[in-house]
Amino acid sequence: MALLKTEDKISPEEYLQGELKSDIRHEYVDGRVYAMTGASVNHNRITGNLARLFGNHLNGKDCETFTSDMKLKVNNEYRYPDIMVVCDNNFLDNGYSTQSPVLIVEVLSKSTRKTDTTEKVFSYLNIPTLLEYVLIEQDIVSVEVMSKSQNWQSRRYYLGDQITFESISLSLSVEEIYERVENEDMQEYLYSE
C-alpha cells in the first residue's frame, strides 16, 4: 500500500486520537502522518491466504493472526503491517495496537518496497519478541524470510519450495501462499502442469 505524507508534525497522542476518528488508516513515523492507500487484488489474495492459513493453524492456541487493521508500535512509530502473529494479550491503546508480534509479513509493491526492505527492517528486527520477518513479492513469486534463529540472514523461497515458519511451527508451500495470485510466474507454473 502506498503512503501519502503530511508535512506537519504531531504528537503520538494526537495521531492516536485522529486515527480513532479517521475513515482511512495512517502510519505515524518521525512525528508525521502518512495516509495509506488501497491494495491490489494480488496483495489481498496473498494476505488473505496467509491470514486464513495462519489462523486455521493457530485455532485453539495462544497465538493469533492480525491483518493490516492492527497497529504495531515500534519505538515512537506506529505501523500497519500486512499480517502479524501475536502470542500474548498485552495490547495497547485500548486494544488498537501491539508491540509484541512474533511474526510480521509485508507484501511488497513498487510503492512500498523501499520502506518495507529498509526502514521497516531496521525497526522490526529490534522488536524483542519478533522471531521472523517475511517479505512477499506480489508481481513475481518470491518469498524472503528473515529469522532470529538464523541471525536475521535472509532465505528466499520460490515455486516448488516449502517454507517452515518456525515462530508458529507451520510449514506451507509457496504455492499455498500464492493461490489465485495472477502474475507471470504463477501463469507459467499453472500452464506447465
Image (cartoon, rainbow, N blue to C red):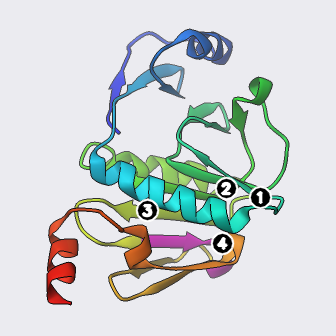
Q: Earlier in the sequence, mark 3 or mark 2?
A: 2
Q: Which residues are magenta?
A: 144-150
Mark nearer the viewer, 3 or 1? 1
> Of the numbered discs in the image, which one, if any, rests on residue 148?
4
Amino acid on which disc 4 is placed? Lys
Label 4 element class:
helix
> x, y (%) of residue 115?
39, 46
Q: Earlier in the sequence, mark 3 or mark 4?
A: 3
Other residues around mark 4 within 10 Å, as few (<14) / some (14–19) / many (≥20): some
Q: CA distance from mark 4 to mark 2?
A: 15 Å
Give the total number of marks visible in the rendering: 4
Magenta stretch: residue 111 in it?
A: no
Q: Earlier in the sequence, mark 4 or mark 2?
A: 2
When the figure is inspected, residue 22 is found, relative to residue 66, above or below; the finding is: above
Residue wearing tag 2? 85
Residue wearing tag 3? 135
> x, y (%) of residue 169?
70, 77
Q: Earlier in the sequence, mark 2 or mark 1?
A: 1
Residue wearing tag 1? 63
> What residue sits 36% from the left and 22% below the top?
5
- Assess whether mark 2 and mark 4 are in contact (beta carbons under 8 angstroms): no
Q: CA distance from mark 1 to mark 4?
A: 18 Å
Q: CA distance from mark 2 to mark 1?
A: 6 Å
Mark nearer the viewer, 3 or 2? 2
Other residues around mark 1 within 10 Å, as few (<14) / some (14–19) / many (≥20): some
Amino acid on which disc 1 is placed? Cys
> What residue sits 33% from the left and 33% below the top?
38
- Assess whether mark 4 and mark 1 are in contact (beta carbons under 8 angstroms): no
> x, y (%) of residue 185?
19, 74
Magenta stretch: residue 149 in it?
A: yes
When the figure is inspected, residue 112 is found, relative to residue 54, above or below; the finding is: above
Q: Nearer the viewer, residue 180 or 169?
A: 180
